[in-house]
Amino acid sequence: MHMADALLSPAVGGAMWAVTAGLTAYSAKKLKEIPDDSRVPLMGVLGAFVFAAQMINFSIPATGSSGHLGGGMILAILLGPHAAFLTLASVLVVQALFFADGGLLALGCNIFNMAFFPCFIAYPFIYRKIAGRYATAKTISVAATVSAVIGLQLGAFSVVLETMASGISALPFNAFVLLMQPIHLAIGLVEGVVTAAVVLFVWQARPEVLAMAEENAPMRGFSMKKVLAGLAAAALVTGGALSWFASTYPDGLEWSMAKTSGSEELPAPEGGIHAALAGIQEKTAFLPDYGFRASEPEKSAGTEAETPKPETPAAWPNPDAGTSVSGLVGGAMTLVLAAAIGMFLRRTSAARR
Amino acid sequence: MEALAGASGDALGSSPVHRLDPRAKCVVTVLFVVAVTSFGRYDVSRLMPFVLYPVAIATLSGVSAGSVAARTLAAAPFILLVGLFNPFFDRQVIVRIGGLAVTGGWMSFLSIAVRSFLAVSAAVLLVLTTRFDLLCAGLRKMCLPRVFVTQLEFLHRYIGLLAGEAQRMVRAHDLRSNGNRPKLALVVYAPMIGLLLLRALDRATRVHRAMKARLFDGEIRVLRPLAFSRSDFLFILAWGGYFLVCRFADVPGLLSGLAGVR
Amino acid sequence: MSHHYLEVRDLRYAYPDGTEALKGVSFRLEHGEAVGLVGANGAGKSTMMLALTGLIFASGGTIDVGGTLLSKKTVGEVRRRIGFVFQDSEDQLFMPTVFDDVAFGPLNQGLSEPEVRERVTDALTRVGAERLADRPTYRLSGGEKRAVAIATVLAMLPDVLIMDEPGSGLDPYGRRLLIGLLRDFRHTRLIATHDLDMVLDVCPRTIVLHEGRIAADGDTRTVFSDAALLERCRLEQPSGMRK
Ligand SMILES: Nc1ncnc2c1ncn2[C@@H]1O[C@H](COP(=O)(O)OP(=O)(O)OP(=O)(O)O)[C@@H](O)[C@H]1O
Ligand SMILES: [Mg+2]
């Protein structure tokens, strides 16, 4: 469920970068408080383990398809939330850089979706609550499964929110949710079962490993209140960035404004799922497509630029076919020009060699 | 693992691009990605001037366009999956080319494809032209938490090794199953992963010992002086300026205007 | 100059699971001496080397390195004096580049930048790997890895070198190079290996470890000509002596 740069707006991407940077700094600070120099190689090698494990596929019973481990919960269980968060983040950075999974702008979102939820929500509030005090094969299995499922559900929902807030995809909110959550329920169950099996394996082979991990991951400072406060702060940062972005660079969000102002509604094919979805949306919508007009003004009251401006002549979408065609031609010309410059550079640098 | 083997940050070239300070390349890459992703959802032609950046960097650094493209395409599936919904949900016709009516959905799909190609290629070029250790040195200087940069370095160091172990385990399993490659059943898979994990834990213990034997005290020290020179500054200034112009001025529009297309 | 000795008395160690790996080991290495440490799989060689550098704490006995008694307090001092080359170079080379790795020890010793650079250059030159300095560590051949691993230790200017299976994974040519190198060192050396021919070439003296105890300690040729001893300790006479 890697988010991709191409589906993100810089406002959402940047805001999630900020949130993730904050979490990284916080985790780094927490680790400093409990110095343990064996953690350095441990985190590195376990990060590499997650990578390696992701290369091995197994068959998902009764489906004919295959899956692989995500590894978030395993890391949280073995390393504790802070070290696991940094380790997962590093895995995602390397994936973004070397495997083009996600992208640089999307990195903040990806780290948040795939590392924050397992480490800071699922682990402390679910895994530890169930398996914390009396670790038995049963509690460990249940805890690992439930926390993996919930971590993935939250992550998937977060993907939907980020995509919606960015407004590059035209997928309506409800359709996207209906698409993502069930898929990730399935993925989460598989992940949960595998996590449970692997953790049990380690627990039986080396009980001390898990015991030590728990010792090194004090749960002090983990309260629901704090986490909720943190999430609220994240939402504020994102909302603030969005509204700033909306007021400064209108065209990034304009299309959604245009949509909300009704000029560009879904073509609403007769009946069928589209109509049904649109119906649901009208009742439940709270995301950009439908809700920004309502929420925007109060969020950044005081500045006057953020109210959806009436279409300015240069703005997209501009349904004037004439200019659009010339735009396309210009684009093609630019492309050719870029290629020509590239060719020229190649000549000159080859000549220099 | 080929991706890692091919571009594992030991970008050993010595082109002018390779020699730039990693910080300069990071800054320009970020500027580029932000500029590209900041366009409206239907913009396609306005993105075209940005093609110059990957083209120029690839050419100047001598990195083969093929390897950039291959890596970039690896990112395609998810993007295409989500992007492909656009044509279904957004059917407003926004351009007519001759008799062909192009809907907003198709335009935005095209836009997603183009921006994906651009954004990913920039990141790919960054790692193909920057040694990983220097990149990390740059990140350290740019005030990333040290634990995190160290973590990146260790991770990068041991990925290949553990991937190799994983591969050997799978191969051993395949050999025992008479050559036909069955998918691993969960009952085989879980202990296999468990074993891989135990080996990883042992590896971590041994590495930790090797570190302590050389007086490791919790702090990783490196000598990797980076010098931010005038050419780095110019690199940022030039590309930053170019991105700015292309973001706020309609370059393709101007061009087509010059060419007399109306 | 005769202070680079290493004296071990009645060393004992049991792993947490109860395995007694060392059951009372005593010996003394004199300054500049090269000693081979041989023994079958599981004899306790690696365990002993870990104990010598304080990486595991022995449950009994003393370790004296040039007048410093190993304890929790002196462990840093002892590690400064004993350079440990690990069996698997992948464990020893954990930094991104060869330079970083060789510089790791000297930097931890608190040396200044020019001093560190000099140490790195010297150490790499010593093992013939100076051209590898900028290479990433995981991109080296087995022989190169071994050479660099030795350089990482040399750069700390240890008095005593202990090596666990330095020849494993090397091709015959790499092995010859290694033997040449080990012979040239002037350090006090303890070399654990299954390659008895190498011991014959490098070490005038040999210690045979068997099930956590010393089964023999003496002149290499004498030890290796005791067929009954070798048989009992699951060792084989080196081909170099059968001629
Ligand atoms: N981590 C461990 N936990 C429990 N027992 C161990 C551990 N490591 C080693 N042992 C046991 O300690 C004994 C000595 O092992 P050691 O690794 O020192 O032998 P070695 O002489 O180095 O063998 P080799 O030639 O195979 O390297 C063996 O019986 C081994 O099974
Ligand atoms: Mg051994």
Image (cartoon, coloured by chain):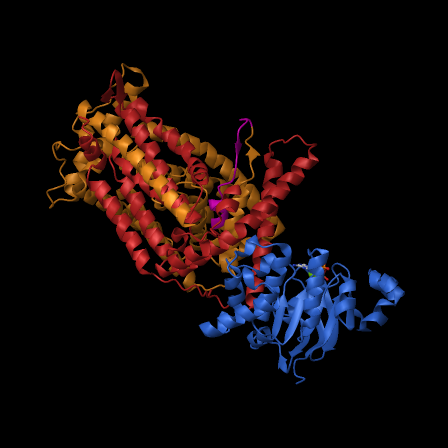
Chain colours: A orange, B red, C blue
Q: How many numbered circles does the render carry?
A: 0
Residue with the most extreme bottom position: C1
User: Does residue C29 appear to the left or right of A195 in the view shown?
Assistant: right
- Quadrant for residue A221, please give it: bottom left
Q: Position of residue A25 (x, y in %)?
A: 36, 57
Q: Tell me which image quadrant ligand 1 sits in.
A: bottom right
The residue depicted at 36 percent of the width and 30 percent of the height is B82
Q: In this view, does C38 lie above or below B55?
A: below
Residue B206 in view (yes/no): no
Where residue B44 appears, as percent x and y from the top left, is: 28, 32
Q: Which of A28 and A248 is in front in this view?
A: A248
Query: Residue A125: percent from the left, percent from the top?
Result: 41, 47
Residue at the extreme top of the image, as rendered: A270
Query: Which is nearer the eye, A77 or B65?
Result: B65
A319 over C225 or under it: above or below: above
Task: Where is residue A311? Give x, y as percent.
Answer: 13, 31
Tell me what residue is drawn at x 30 percent, y 25 percent: B106
Q: In which quarter of the image is residue B86?
A: top left
Q: Looking at the rendering, which quadrant does residue B140 occupy?
A: bottom left
Vertical comparison of A262 with A214: above or below: above
Q: Indicate yes or no whether the magenta region holds residue C21.
A: no
Position of residue A145 in the picture relative to residue C151 (left or right): left
Q: Nearer the viewer, residue B142 or B81?
A: B142
B166 vs B142, left or right, is right
- Find the magenta span and give its range: A62-76
Residue C68 visible at all: yes
Quadrant for the N terminus of chain A, please. top left
